[in-house]
């Protein structure tokens, strides 16, 4: 059994990936399918999200959604995954597949990881 | 490649579909699953997802369509995500023939019926990513 709480703090690496993605997706249609470019507000929201991850918490992968907002994913397999999209309007959109169960919804985000998401990720790593 | 128009031919449940991948970072190279990230299956800007029907195409013809898409966008063709039509349909989505650009117009289709809420779209994108098989593009293909 692995834990959602990692031994080391990998936030610096995650921030570096966000910086790289910000550069990769700076122009519209960066995915060839009509995506919107990233923005300074999307970047700032992503950085706030990283800052809100509890110390020692398992670090997610980061990507950019086609709407230009950053998405974070915790994943232990194709059907064991939690995906969170961070919007600058202080909203987190999330979806999760955990075995045969599915979860999705929205949570307000004011610089603290909502307990709903913290529990989902911890559940993912407790299986 | 057959020249019979497909625009009026419904997409059958067992038809194979391809989502061309033009962003290297949409693919996981560490052997973990799913190989294609869910963000590659999120619909945008219209609430539909553009795909190509394999129907009547040889492998080299399918790749040629992908290369055409990549050339039009001036992006590299990384590969494609293959899935059968019944996968989106099991998620309450549908696959319909659609107008497309250039030589690929005949085989173009859209995955439609997406909910408007982003979180609801995301969970369906996770399901498509979980079912999709990544096929890497090789110049020799």
Image (spheres, coloured by chain):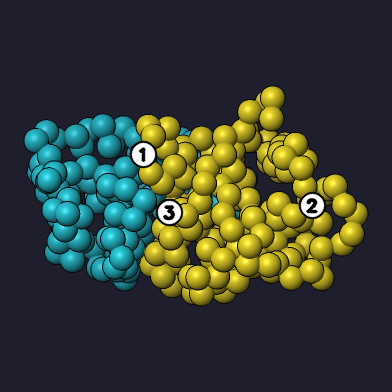
Chain colours: A cyan, B yellow
**Can residue B95 be seen?**
yes
- 1 and 3 marks in contact (CB < 8 Å): no
**Residue at mark 2:** B56
* Residue in view at x 57 percent, y 39 percent: B135
* Residue in view at x 64 percent, y 55 percent: B16
Give the spatial CA distance, label 1 vs label 3.
Answer: 11 Å
**Residue at mark 3:** B130
Residue A52 in the image, given as x and y percentages of width and height: 17, 51
Q: Chain of mark 3?
A: B
1 or 3: tag closer to the N-terminus: 1
Dots 1 and 2 on the same chain: yes
Query: For residue A6, what is the image quadrant?
Result: top left
Residue B117 in the figure: left or right of residue A29: left
- 1 and 2 marks in contact (CB < 8 Å): no
**Residue at mark 1:** B32
Placement of the C terminus of chain B among the 4 image quadrants: top right
Q: What element does badge 3 sit on?
A: helix
Give the spatial CA distance, label 1 vs label 2.
Answer: 32 Å
Q: Chain of mark 1?
A: B
Q: Chain of mark 2?
A: B
Dots 1 and 3 on the same chain: yes
Which residue is nearer to you in this view: B49 or A16? B49
- Which residue lies most toward the right here? B3
- Which residue lies most toward the top here? B140
* Residue in view at x 44 percent, y 42 percent: B35
B8 vs B140: above or below: below
3 or 2: tag closer to the N-terminus: 2
């Amino acid at each position: 059994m692995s834990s959602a709480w990692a031994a080391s703090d990998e936030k610096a690496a995650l921030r570096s990936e966000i910086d790289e993605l910000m550069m990769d997706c700076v122009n519209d249609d960066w995915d060839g399918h009509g995506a919107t470019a990233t923005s300074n507000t999307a970047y700032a929201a992503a950085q706030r999200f990283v800052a809100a991850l509890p110390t020692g918490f398992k670090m997610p992968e980061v990507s950019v959604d086609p709407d230009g907002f950053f998405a974070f994913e915790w994943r232990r397999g194709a059907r064991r995954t939690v995906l969170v999209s961070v919007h600058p309007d202080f909203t987190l959109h999330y979806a999760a597949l955990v075995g045969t169960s599915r979860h999705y919804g929205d949570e307000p985000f004011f610089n603290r990881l909502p307990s709903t998401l913290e529990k989902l990720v911890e559940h993912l790593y407790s299986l | 490649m057959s020249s019979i128009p497909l625009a009026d031919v419904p997409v059958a449940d067992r038809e194979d579909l391809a989502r061309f991948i033009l962003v290297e970072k949409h693919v996981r190279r560490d052997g973990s699953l799913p190989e294609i990230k869910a963000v590659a299956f999120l619909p945008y800007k219209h609430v539909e997802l553009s795909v190509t029907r394999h129907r009547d195409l040889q492998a080299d013809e399918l790749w040629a369509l992908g290369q055409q898409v990549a050339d039009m966008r001036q992006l590299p063709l990384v590969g494609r995500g293959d899935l059968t039509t019944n996968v989106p349909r099991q998620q309450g989505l549908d696959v319909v023939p659609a107008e497309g650009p250039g030589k690929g117009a005949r085989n173009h289709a859209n995955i439609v019926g997406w909910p408007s809420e982003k979180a609801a779209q995301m969970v369906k994108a996770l399901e498509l990513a979980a079912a999709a098989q990544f096929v890497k593009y090789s110049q020799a293909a």
